[in-house]
Image: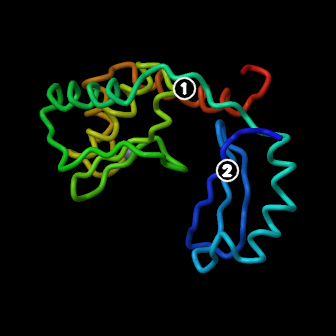
């Protein structure tokens, strides 16, 4: 038995889905179901063993939560922007997001990334406080603070792939 934690995520969706992510097994269930529903229990029983066999270890941490928040503070100052709120939490699909109301949300999994890559994600989300889109003007802002941002995006994609590659762990 693997000791990777199982995370149940209730979501607006039709079917149940289980997937292995670094450091956890995620089980997505339609929001109308409860964890204790028969069909959910059955689904888990049937699919967990396979997922556990494929479980991936959590990548080592490069940064702490405090390091990430400090980077936000640093870039906030450099870029002269002021988020309404900064939230650091587990996100399932993205490294970060920025809402139209000025809330910057960052994925706790950023702790797995090296500092230059976290800087890129922070700079990207803070740039959305100025341009809430991915227009040429947006990328111009990112380039102002991180001229090598394209290389960082490539390194970020490579890091993402490495988390799913058991052999490199
Ligand atoms: Zn963006």
Q: From the viewer's side, name the closer residue of 133 and 21.
A: 21
Of badges 2 and 1, the one in the foreground is 2
In the picture shown, does residue 155 fall above or below 128? above
Residue 131 placement (x, y as % from top left): 25, 47
Ligand 1 under 8 Å from disc 2 Cβ: no
Residue to which mark 1 is pinned:
154
Q: Quadrant of residue 17?
A: bottom right
Quadrant of the rendering where the C terminus is positioned: top right
Q: From the viewer's side, name the closer residue of 22 and 137.
A: 22
The residue drawn where x is 85% and y is 41% is: 53
Q: Quadrant of residue 136?
A: top left
Describe residue 58's horizontal placement relative to residue 78 as left or right. Answer: right
Residue 151 placement (x, y as % from top left): 48, 21
* Lower position in the chain sequence, tag 2 or tag 1: 2
Q: From the viewer's side, name the closer residue of 120 and 103.
A: 103
User: Disc 1 on helix, strand or loop?
Assistant: helix
How far, Cα to Cα, is label 2 from label 1?
Answer: 30 Å
Residue 23 numbered mark, or none: none
Q: Residues within 10 Å of mark 2 (few under 14, many from 20)?
A: some
Q: From the viewer's side, name the closer residue of 137 and 114.
A: 114
The residue drawn where x is 32% and y is 46% is: 87
Residue 12 placement (x, y as % from top left): 56, 73
User: Disc 2 on helix, strand or loop?
Assistant: strand
Residue 103 placement (x, y as % from top left): 26, 51
Q: Quadrant of ligand 1?
A: top left
The residue drawn where x is 83% and y is 41% is: 1
Residue 6 numbered mark, or none: 2
């Amino acid at each position: 038995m693997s000791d990777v934690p199982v995370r149940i995520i209730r979501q607006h969706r039709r079917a149940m889905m289980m997937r292995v992510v670094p450091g956890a097994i995620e089980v997505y269930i339609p929001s109308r179901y409860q964890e204790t529903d028969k069909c959910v229990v059955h689904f888990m029983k049937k699919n967990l063993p396979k997922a556990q066999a494929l479980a991936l270890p959590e990548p080592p941490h490069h940064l702490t939560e405090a390091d990430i928040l400090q980077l936000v503070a640093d870039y906030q100052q450099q870029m002269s922007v002021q988020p309404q709120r900064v939230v650091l939490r587990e996100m399932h699909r993205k490294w970060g997001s920025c809402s139209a109301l000025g809330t910057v949300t960052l994925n706790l999994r950023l702790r797995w990334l090296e500092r230059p890559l976290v800087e890129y994600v922070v700079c990207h989300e803070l740039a959305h406080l100025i341009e809430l889109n991915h227009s040429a003007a947006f990328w111009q802002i990112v380039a102002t603070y991180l001229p090598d941002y394209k290389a960082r995006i490539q390194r970020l994609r490579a890091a993402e792939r490495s988390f799913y590659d058991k052999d490199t762990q």
